[in-house]
Amino acid sequence: MAGRLVVAITSQDIGARITTRRRVPEGFRDTVGILVSWEDGLLKIQKRDGTVVEIREESLVAAKVVPAAPPRPGRM
């Protein structure tokens, strides 16, 4: 049985860690990070390495809030 793709985030989730899947010309691309803004149909997500990814709202096929990232080994 296949899973259902759902966009389960809103602008109220700014500051939360989210995962997204969006359609790109090559197929799909996933991004995980902190939702830093959502204005005029453009989401900005800050990844763990500090880079910010901009995603057009209409390209989203799935998204949800996820728990905080677990600590990385050797880093406390």
Image (cartoon, rainbow, N blue to C red):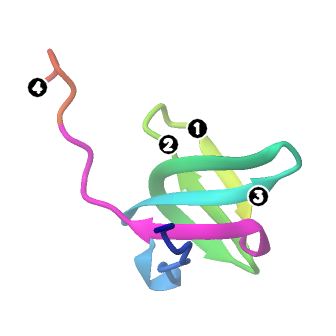
From mark 1 to mark 3, how far is it between C-alphas? 20 Å
**Number of disc labels:** 4
Does 5 sit left or right of 66 as displayed?
right
Gap in Å between the C-alphas at discs 3 and 2?
Answer: 18 Å
What residue is pinned by disc 4?
76
**Residue drawn at (36%, 66%) of the image:** 16
Q: Residue at x 89, y 48 (%)?
A: 25
> In what element is the residue under mark 1?
loop
| Three-letter code for the amino acid on which mark 2 is drawn | Lys
Give the mark nearer the N terminus: 4 vs 2. Answer: 2
Mark toward the viewer: 4 or 3:
3
Q: Which mark is residue 23?
A: 3
Q: Which residue is mark 1?
A: 51
As measured in the structure, the alpha-carbon distance from the residue carrying label 4 to the one carrying label 1 is 22 Å
Q: Could you tell me if the residues under marks 1 and 2 are in contact, i.e. CB atoms within 8 Å?
A: yes
Nearer the N terminus, badge 4 or badge 3? Answer: 3
On the image, numbered disc 2 is attached to which residue?
A: 47
Name the residue type under label 3.
Answer: Arg
Give, as a single range, the part of the protein colored magenta: 57-70
Is 61 contained in the magenta span?
yes
- Determine the secondary structure under disc 3: strand
Q: Please say if the residues under marks 3 and 2 sit with CB atoms less than 8 Å apart.
A: no
User: In the rendered structure, which disc, 4 or 1, sits on the residue that comes first in sequence?
Assistant: 1
